[in-house]
Amino acid sequence: MFLVLFGMSGIGKSTLARGLQQRSPKLFTRPRMLTTRPRRASDDDQEMEFLNPEEYLAIAAKGLMVDMRSPDGLAYYGYRNESEVEHVCPILLGSPYVFDRFLLLPGAVKVLLIGDPNLGLALRNETAEYREKREMINRELNDRFYGRSEFRGKCDLILQNEFVCQHEFVVKCERAVLECLR
C-alpha cells in the first residue's frame, strides 16, 4: 500500500506527510525523494536527496520504485526502490505529469489536496517574487490537471486544506486515509 499526495505548490503536501509520519510512525513512513531540481529555501535534506542529472540517471538505471521525470526534462524526481516494511505505508509526493505511473503501484491511495496555495506559501515566508512564480505554475497545474474532473475522478480522496490548524488538518486527513486503506 502507498499514500500518494498531489496538489499545487504550497498546498501542504510535505506538511501533511510530515504530520502523518510523526503522528503514526508505525503506520506511515516517508522515503526520501530524489531530485535534480534546484534546492528551495523550504527544502529539508532529511526529505530530499539533491542529485545532478547523471547521478539520478545512474540510480534510475538500477531501478526506481517511482520515476517521475518531467516531460520537459528540466528536472527529475523519483523514489528509490527500498524494501517494503510490512504494515508501513510509504507516503509519496506525486507529480500529475506521470499520474498513470501511480496507478500501477499496488494499493496506492491517491489524495488530491485543494485550497488556496498562496496561504501555504505565505506561511512558509516565501518571497513575493517566489510566490508570484509559483502562482503562475500553480495556475497551469490547475488548468491542466487539478481543476479537471478527469483528474479528480482518478483520485481516491480530495481533501480541503483550510490553513487554520495544522494538527486538525493532519487528524482529518489521517482519518480519511485510514478509512480508504481499509
Image (cartoon, rainbow, N blue to C red):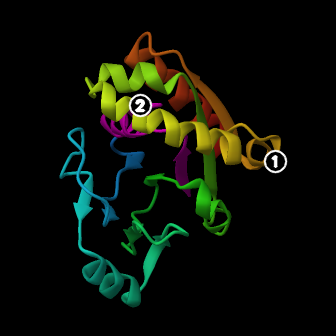
Against 157, residue 78 (above or below) is below
Q: Is residue 86 magenta?
A: no
Residue in view at x 56 percent, y 28 percent: 175
Q: Which residue is mark 2?
A: 132
Is residue 11 visible to the viewer in this orientation of the structure? Answer: yes
> Along the horizontal axis of the image, is 33 left or right of 145?
left
In which quadrant will I find the C terminus? top right
- Three-letter code for the amino acid on which mark 1 is drawn: Glu
Where is residue 105? Give x, y as percent: 60, 66
Q: Position of residue 118 (x, y in %)?
A: 45, 23
Is residue 80 placed above or below 165 in the rendered structure? below
Q: Observer-nearest residue: 43 or 180?
A: 43
Q: Secondary structure at mark 1?
A: helix
The span shown in magenta is 1-24
Q: Which x, y percent locates residue 165?
A: 41, 12
- The answer to whether 132 appears left or right of 137 in the picture is left
Q: Earlier in the sequence, mark 2 or mark 1?
A: 2
Answer left or right for 182 relative to 54. right
| Residue type indicated by callout 2 | Glu
Q: Where is mark 1, residue-wise?
A: 150
Above or below, comparing residue 39 to residue 22 in the picture: below
Q: Residues within 10 Å of mark 1 (few under 14, many from 20)?
A: few
Disc 2 packing (10 Å; few <14; some 14–19; many ≥20): few
Q: Which mark is residue 115?
A: none
**Front one among 137 and 80:** 137
Q: Secondary structure at mark 2?
A: helix
